[in-house]
Image (cartoon, rainbow, N blue to C red):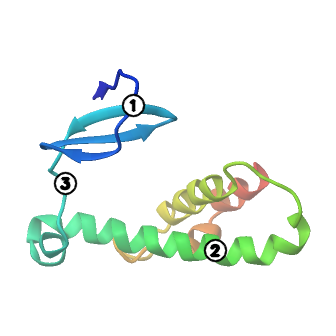
Amino acid sequence: MAKQKGIIPLVGTIGGVNFYYLNGKPVARKAGGGFNGKAIKTKANMRRVRENSSEFGHCSEVNKVFRKALRPFYKGYKFTHFHSRLMTLFTQLKDLDTINQRGKRVVFEGVLTTEGLSFFKTI
């Protein structure tokens, strides 16, 4: 990844190079690569990507409901990285689910384990 130098930092894609900000600093890298939607939905070798996406979406939904439930208690206060810290917690809890198969694991089953309950005590 290249760092930009100059008077005017660029943002966007020019000639196959992406220019953007990363942690407040202008950087550049070669454009392209990554996944496309059709490949993710249809290719057999993208099965793990679909499984991860499904589980991550579930954790994100649990995170949203959890934050909404706690909102009356922290309204008016600012918690930096609150969403991402909860996302880490719920992802770890989901990983403790040994009942469901990969791609269908849920946070609730992880919370029911003794290790899962201990995660809440460390928050």
Return the residue at label 3: 34
Per the image, the residue denoted by label 2 is 64
Q: Quadrant of residue 53?
A: bottom left
- The amino acid beneath tag 3 is Gly
Say what secondary structure mark 3 lies in: loop
Which residue: 64% across, 59% down? 83
The residue carrying mark 1 is: 8
Name, please, the residue furthest toward the front: 7
- Quick one: 118 or 6, which is closer to the camera? 6
Label 1, secondary structure: give it: loop
Which residue is located at x 57 percent, y 67 percent? Answer: 110
Report crowding for label 1: few under 14, some 14 to 19, many 20 or more residues within 10 A (C-alpha): few
Alpha carbons under labels 3 and 1: distance apart: 28 Å
Q: Is residue 36 above or below residue 82?
A: below
Amino acid type at mark 1: Ile
Say few, some or many: other residues with alpha carbon within 10 Å of mark 2 (under 14 / 14 to 19 / 20 or more). Answer: some
* Label 3: few (<14), some (14–19) or many (≥20) C-alpha neighbours in 10 Å: few
Percent of width and height locating residue 91: 52, 60
- The disc placed on residue 120 is none
Give percent across and percent down for residue 39. 12, 70
Q: Position of residue 28 (x, y in %)?
A: 28, 34
